[in-house]
Structure formats: C-alpha cells, structure tokens
Image: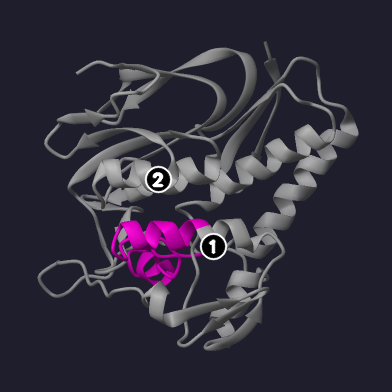
Amino acid sequence: MPRPSVGFQAIGTHWQLDTPEPLAAEVLAAVHARIARFDADWSRFRDDSWVSEVARAGAGTYRLPDDAGPLLDGYDVAERCTAGAVDPLVGRCLEQLGYDAAYSLRPRRDAEGALLTTPAPPWRTTARRDGSTLTLGAPALIDVGAGGKGYLVDLVAGVLAEHGVAEHVVDAGGDLRAAVPEPLTVALEDPRDPARALGVVRLGAGALCGSATNRRAWGEGVHHVVDARTGAPTSDVRATWAVGPTALAADLAATALFFAEPDLVASRFGVRYVVLRGDGSLRWSLDLDGEVFA
C-alpha cells in the first residue's frame, strides 16, 4: 500500500504523491516538468500561456497544444449533456465575476447591487476543431477549470507509470487518481460543515473528483461553478462527487452534475455519483462502492 511520499504546491493547489517507495529525483523532475508544460498551455492566469495568447489575438485559427485532444473531447461531451451549461469558453464570465488573472474577486454589479453577467460564446457554434487546430469565430477566453485539473492528475499518473511506479495515488487538492491493490476509503466532506462527512467511497483503481460551491467562493452566491448560458453562478446544487475510470472523466462529470440529470451524466462519462442539492437532499448512484449517510 502506498505511503505518503512527497507533497508540493502547483497550479494553485496542494499535491501529494503517495508511492510504496520514495520517488527518485528524476521521476519527480519529470512530474514537475509535465505540470509546468500543462500550466504554460492552459493557465488563464499567466500572460505567456497559450490560452492568454489566443484571448489577445481574437478570432482566428490556432494550433492546439499537443495534449488538447482528450481534454476538448471531454468538453464536447459535457457541453452536449448539459445543453451548453459547461463550456470551455466561460473564461470571460469568470472574469466578470471577479475571478480574473489579478484575483480581484470584485464582481461587476448594477446600481441595485445585482450581479452583471453575460453568457459565454457557445462552444458548439463558436469553435471548430480540425485535427491539431482550433478555429474561433469570435474572441474568447478559454477556461478549462471544469476538467483541466483532473486531466493533469491523469497526466501525472501517466508519468509515474512510465517510470515504473505502477502503484500510486495522485492527489491534487482532493482530486484523486489511484492504482493500489487495496481500496482506499475516502470521506466526502460536507460543504456546510467541513468537520462532517456525508459519506465514504472506496477507490482502488480509478479516480474520484468533487466540486462544491463553498470552494473558490468570494461573496454571497458568488463562486466558480458558472452556467455558461447565463454567466451566473449556479445555486440549485451545493456539491457533487464523481467516481470514474479517469480523473478527467470524473472532474468534468462533477461539474456537469450541477446542471444535468445525474443518470445522464453517469451514462455519458461512465461514472458513479453523489449529489448534494441546494435544499440539503442527497442523490447517489445505486451501485456506488461506498456509503452515503442520508
């Protein structure tokens, strides 16, 4: 069974890599290099990233980062099953809410104090992929926050496997990818009371990702889970968790569960789920490997 091996900060969150033996220096260097490469492509908080360069240039055709295919394929699925609520062109909506590169956390409001929001450009009609290129029909700021961290967890797990570290747990701020002989028991934190668990799941091979409106929140009703169709934060669901074959699938599914019928999301992404609704009620997959304390 892996034991705590190494922890570090990257892409704004804490990472922990648990392995049976301490990681060799060259393996850890490869992990950091992979994270740095992903950040240089996909971070909207860096002026020199690919995402920022595309946002400055406006409409046009751009060569995609080499790892873009699976990530954007996943967004295609999420966009379809949420009828456009999950959209990788949601970056300007988040900026308008104050979640910008400067972390101003100052939402735009009208004279009465109501949030000023605008919809994101629809991914389905604004963007076109053709092999290794992306064509945008209008200026847009890409944000892959709904799936990017999960995808990076998968990529880091892949680096470990490539270096012969077959048994491992990769944890990036609670998004987990595990390959262990004995399942881990993971508690599901109640967003209303972090000292309380809503349930537990068992994870042996695969991934667990969650999302909650109390994470990255900076005002009453202002948080990072945004409906791209309106540009406004959602309020019907408080937290979601998804268990799936990859962290990319689980991460995107966890966001899609805020907007779509849970069983539809489960079938599209191949996940099991737990959903905490705004009224405090819980819904979960009947075949969940775990227990929900309803």
| Camera-side residue of 206 and 268 | 268
- Callouts 2 and 1 close, C-beta under 8 Å: no
Residue 10 visible in the current orientation: no
Instruction: Looking at the image, tell me whether mark 2 or mark 1 is earlier in sequence order.
Output: 1
Q: Position of residue 279 (x, y in %)?
A: 11, 36
Residue 173, relative to residue 120: is it above or below?
A: above
What residue is shown at x 40% (from left), y 65% (from top)? Answer: 87
| Camera-side residue of 32 and 167 | 167
Colour convention: one colour
Amino acid type, label 2: Ala
- Confirm whether the magenta stretch covers residue 97: yes
What residue is shown at x 37% (from left), y 63% (from top)? Answer: 98
Callout 1: few (<14), some (14-19), or many (20+) C-alpha neighbours within 10 Å?
some
Q: Position of residue 105 (x, y in %)?
A: 37, 59
Q: Secondary structure at mark 2?
A: helix
Q: Position of residue 72 (x, y in %)?
A: 54, 62
- Which image quadrant is residue 238 in? top left
Residue 150, relative to residue 52: is it above or below?
A: above
Q: In the rendered view of the protein, which quadrant contains the N terminus? A: top right
Circle 1 is placed at which residue position? 72
- Confirm whether the magenta stretch covers residue 219: no
Q: In the rendered view of the protein, which quadrant contains the C terminus? A: top left
Which residues are drawn in magenta? 74-101
Q: Secondary structure at mark 1?
A: helix
Count of number-bearing discs = 2
- Which image quadrant is residue 7 in? top right
Q: Position of residue 221 (x, y in %)?
A: 21, 51
Circle 2 is placed at which residue position? 253
